[in-house]
Structure formats: structure tokens, C-alpha cells
Amino acid sequence: MSTGIEKDRKRPTKRLLWAVGLFLAALAVMVLATRWMGGSRLERYRQRLLAQGEVLDWHSAMTNTTVSDGQQSKQLVVLAGGLNQGSEVSKGVYPEFEFPAPGVALVPWKRPLDWERFRQEMTDHREALIALRALLQDPDVAASRSSYSPATYISGAAPFVQKREAAYWLWRAHVLALEQGDLQGAREEIQALLGLARLQEHDRFLVDHMIRVAIARIAAQASWSALQVEGWDEAVLISLADTWRKVPVLEGMNSSITMERAMGVWFFNLYRTNAPGANTFIGLSRPSSGLDLDALFVEPVWRFTYMDEDELNYLRHFQVFIEAVRIGVQDRSLEKAEAHLQGTPVESTSSLVPSEFRHRYSAMLVPNWTKALRVVLQVETEKQMILVVTAIRRHILKTGQPPASLEALVPDYLEAVPIDGMDGRPLRYILRADGTWRLYSVGTDFIDDGGDPSWISDPGEGSMWWGRDAVWPDAAFQ
């Protein structure tokens, strides 16, 4: 009797063990199937991209790139380090427009400032600034052999901060030159800024290109400032325009986005080998003490089961961004690029497992290309505006009056009417009855408001792109 009771008691235990075993077996099959399907889908998609001529590894992305030893960048680091010793007076002279009214910018040499102290500080840095200008007269555009690698990208060894600081100091020297009535000195600082924007222009990481674009924007603001004063002759206007034409603001985007995707693929390969540095690449840090459950459990499960699917998700999303950027570059139109992004759904994989776990890293690795492309096309449009304004100034020097239209500048002053990078159409121009003129872009809403600079919201100090239309500012001298 007792034996029968014991058997009855053991049956539920056996059934539970069988149930648990079957569940674990089914789970193992599901995990293995998920891993296999993810790997298969990833490989098929990779082959499809390669068949289309896409580049997926950073070694290939560097093909046909001119490489140098980067000596100029090294000298720049030394010079920028010596310059970055100014007080709050000099550091407060930032390259930003100050708008007393919509469409009107205050010339920078009329801003409230302790000018006596500022002049003394700039005098103290005179020798370093002379050396910096000399360095940038003939910039080395090749990629730097010593710094161009994924390891450098991770370590942050590239001289991004030093380039920014050098640009700020050249801007300060430019402002001081204008304040002292030295137009020749102001033009030399613009030339140096444009040289800095071209330094190592074959470096193809996105951050490299965006730093160059930021420096070009500072040079654009310096060009606007200098063009508000008299003393320009035709030869100098032609020289300024020719120098600007050499600055690849928009042209570097296609190679940058190709390199950025290749770096993401490199990151996933780094994780496959469990190599150190992967978390550093995307800015993650591990606890210095205590139990790290993510590293012990979550990440290994993700790596074994969903890493291939995560990389597939990364490539699919990135391909849509790449296509949008290429459209924006080819058509010089932010409007068309954004329309492609909004109208192109990204293929996805359905699953009961939350996307946050399956796509653990792909969302972090896809940058905000909409914002990046918007900034690049804005600066490209500012560049085109400078080409137009130099042509208008030349026309006035020759004829005594501004042109009736931008078409009237072709072909004597421009090869073609420059394009508005917002909508891909020619820049807008209005000649008023009193002989003054207005040059503008339709802005980021892509609507032509007739050159209306009214602020969409209060910009304080900053950008002409806050207006309904992005208007080449009139100058305020007080």
C-alpha cells in the first residue's frame, strides 16, 4: 500500500521534470533557430548590398584615399595648445551672429567688449597666430596615416578639439582686424579658416567631416563680416570666391556616410570576437564594482541569439539613410532627402521578444543623419550665398549698381546660378526699388515666404536659419 502511494507521489514530479525538459528543449530549438535565421538573413542582405556595389568594411572605404604622415595636424595640436590660454575676455568672442532684429546682424567688432584687454590678449598670442596662418596657407588635405584607424576613433586621439580651438582663435583675430580697420588682416584670417576647413579633408569619419563643416560655418560668418566693409577690389573678391569653391562642404558627405556604416560593421565584428573596446566605441561603461548582470547574462544571450539580427537591423536602417543622403547630395536638396526618409519604410523582423533586447545596439549606432545632412546643406547654402555676394559686389564695382537678377551674373561673374540646398532650386534674389537687394534661401520649411526673415521663434544669438526664410543679413553697426 505504501509503495503505491509513493509511486503516486513521484508521478507529478516526473511529469514536472518532463515538462521542464520539454520546455528547455523547445527553448533551445527556438534559440538555435533564431540564431540560424538571423545569420542567414544577415548574410543574404550583405550579399545583396555588395552586389549593388556598397562598401561594408572600413579598409575598402579607405581605398584610393591619399594618406600622409599628418605632420600639419601634429603642428596644429601644439599651436592650439599654446593658444588656448586666454582669459574669459578672448574666450567670450564666439563666432555667432547677434540679431538686434530679424534679418539684421550686428557686426562683431561693434559688440560690447573690453576691447583694450582683448587687444592686449591678442597681442600676447601674435606669434602663435602668425605661425598658425603660415601652417594653413597650403593645407595638407590627405588623410593622416598615424591617426586614421578605428582604434583612433575609439581612443579620441584625433585633433577635433584642437581644430575647433584654432578656428575660434582665427575668428578672434579676424574680429580684431576689422575692429582696427585692417581689411587685409581680416581677409588673411578668412583664408586661414578656409585652409583649416580643408586640413586632412580626406579623413572620412563623420565626426571629421562635421568638424570641417563647423569650421566652414565660422569662415562663412567671417566672410559676411568682412563683406560689410568697403575696400574690396575685383581681384580680392575673385580670390575669396575661388578659395571658397575649394572647400568640400557637401562633397564629403557620401564618403563619410560610407565610412560610418563600415565602422558599425566593424563594431559588430569586434563584438563577435568579444574583443575589448566595443563598449567604448558606443560610449558604454561597465560598473567598476559589484555584480554586472548585464555583462554576465544579458549580453551573452544577446550575442549568441540576436547579434546577427541586430546587425541586419542596423544595415537596413543605414541603407535608407545612405540613400537619403545621396539624394540630398546629388540634388542639393534637403527637401528631397527628407521626403525619401519619410516615404521609405524599413523592413523589419517580427518577434515576441522586445525590440529593445533584440536590437540592443543598432539604434545607438545609427546617427542622426537628418540633423547632420541639414547642417551640411545649410553651410553649403551659406557657401553658395558667399559666391553670389562676391559676384554682386563685382557687378557693382563694374556697373555701379546691383544686378537685376542672379541670371544677369551668368556667365561673367558666375558659371551658373547657385543652388539653395534646402529645396534644390536656385537661390532667391530680390532687387528693391531703392537699389538695395535681398538674397535668401527658403529655409528648413521649404516654403518661399518672399524673403521674410521673421523669426519662427526667438533665436537670441546664433543663426539666420531661425527665420521663415534664411536671409543674408543686413548689417547693423550699433
Image: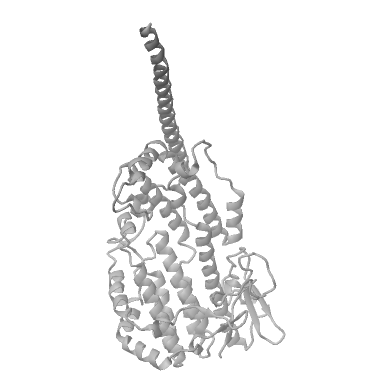
Position of the C terminus by quadrant: bottom right
Please tell me which residue lies in front, 32 or 28: 28
Q: Does residue 204 lie above or below 54 as drawn?
A: below
Looking at the picture, how far across and down is residue 290, in whole percent? 30, 49
Please tell me which residue lies in front, 304 or 239: 304
Looking at the picture, how far across and down is residue 193, in whole percent? 41, 76
Question: How are the residues colored?
Answer: one colour
Looking at the picture, how far across and down is residue 34, in whole percent? 44, 32
Q: To which quarter of the image does residue 191 belong?
A: bottom left
Residue at the right extreme? 433
Residue 62 appearing in the image: no
Which residue corresponds to the image point at 31% horizontal and 73% vertical from the top-left?
76
Please tell me which residue lies in front, 256 or 18: 18
Residue 158 appearing in the image: yes
Position of the N terminus by quadrant: top left
Residue at the front extreme? 1
Q: Does residue 447 lie above or below 116 as drawn?
A: above
Instruction: Tell how many labels.
Output: 0
Looking at the picture, how far across and down is residue 272, in whole percent? 34, 41
Q: Does residue 251 lie above or below 182 as drawn?
A: above
Q: Does residue 38 lie above or below 186 as drawn?
A: above
Which residue corresponds to the image point at 48% horizontal and 84% vertical from the top-left?
235
In the visual, does 450 lie left or right of 141?
right
